Amino acid sequence: MKFYLAPMEGITGYIYRNALYACYDNIDRYFTPFIMPNQNRCFNSRELNDVLPAHNRGMDTIPQILTNNAEDFVKTALELQKMGYKEVNLNLGCPSRTVVTKMRGAGFLAEQQLLKKFLDEIFDRLDMKISVKTRIGMEDAEEFYELIEIYNKYPMEELIIHPRLQTDYYKNKPNLDVFADALSLSRNKICYNGDLFTRKDYEAFTAGFPQVEAVMLGRGVLTDPDLVGHITGGTLPDQERFKGFHDLLCSEYEKVMSGDRNVLFKMKELWFYMIHLFPDSEKYAKKIKKAQHLRDYRAAVDALLRDRTMQMPGGSEG
């Protein structure tokens, strides 16, 4: 099985990816948060920093592009190709209302004729690998059966399917019936994405779909950065290793961000997920959330790690 890191805007940037790679190194492919080009530029400064080869050494990194304009996609892909990238990923999955109302991400799925024209152009003009990350439709799962006919017309490197509708956002359960149909209907290689948070989730999924050769993990890895290790090697939670990951991540944010407030915003965003590794930790979570300075934040984290033992969600203690 191949394991991919899902792109999550504002969270899985190059600093997070490098810390994950340095401390765990068990992800096969890292997909960047989306680049949103326009007619005036391919990248803003954050996007450029995220894809610079110097910021992605040693990792198999795939830049993701979010647009409904074929010219902008091609222009950006060519710039990435100059940097040495051999593959780009098209975002047809983002369910955010601000994205969807501009007919981007999952919003593009509602305009199938325009989507087909877009795909015609980018596959015709680009001499590089193109993968697609998609949802199964906007409002009705039946939409997927028309979408898969479109997708089958193109030699995709991979079709990554998150089997939810745009209107589901991240609620409800992934539609595994539609995913099963996708496996039988698709002419392209399929990767699964959606709600694999624990080893138990992974084992249940692979028991039902043993033919799947790649899965994309998002919120599961944000919660448990060694999720892949637990899945593949049966490793137990390692509190010292987790502390090393946390400390490296925090120090790297400090190097590129000015002021405690910006660093704390990034770290607190991650604790929304990671706190679930520590049972009965509500008072510690509250102190982390309330910290206004890095010294107070570090004291709160140190207290948590001293007083509570890591436990995999639904799993064993370290």
Image (cartoon, rainbow, N blue to C red):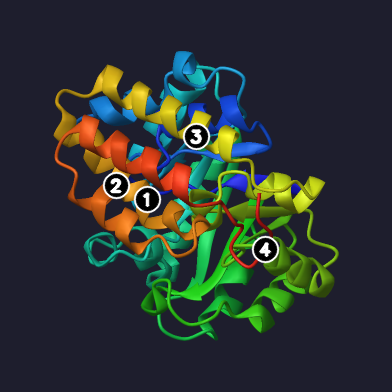
| Position of residue 95 measured from the top left corner of the image (x, y, whole percent) | 36, 66
Give the alpha-carbon distance from disc 3 to disc 2, as whole Å. 15 Å
| Position of residue 3 measured from the top left corner of the image (x, y, whole percent) | 68, 46
Quadrant housing residue 300: top left
Q: Is residue 217 left or right of residue 316?
A: left
Q: Amino acid at mark 1?
A: Trp
Give the alpha-carbon distance from disc 1 to disc 3, as whole Å. 13 Å
- Which comes sooner in the sequence, label 4 or label 2? 2
User: SS of the residue at dot 2?
Assistant: helix
- Which comes sooner in the sequence, label 3 or label 2? 3
Foreground residue, 89 or 125?
89
On screen, residue 212 above or below 125: below
Q: Is residue 54 left or right of residue 58?
A: left
Give the alpha-carbon distance from disc 3 to disc 4, as whole Å. 19 Å
From the image, tell me which residue sits under label 2: 268
Does residue 100 show up? yes
Please identify the residue farthest to the front as the structure is shown: 307
Q: Measuring 65% from the left and 47% from the top, which residue is drawn there?
A: 237
From the image, tell me which residue sits under label 3: 243
| Position of residue 89 measured from the top left corner of the image (x, y, whole percent) | 52, 44
- Which comes sooner in the sequence, label 3 or label 4? 3
User: SS of the residue at dot 4?
Assistant: loop
Give the alpha-carbon distance from disc 4 to disc 2, as whole Å. 24 Å
Q: Which mark is residue 271?
A: 1
State if disc 4 and disc 3 touch (CB < 8 Å). no
From the image, tell me which residue sits under label 4: 315
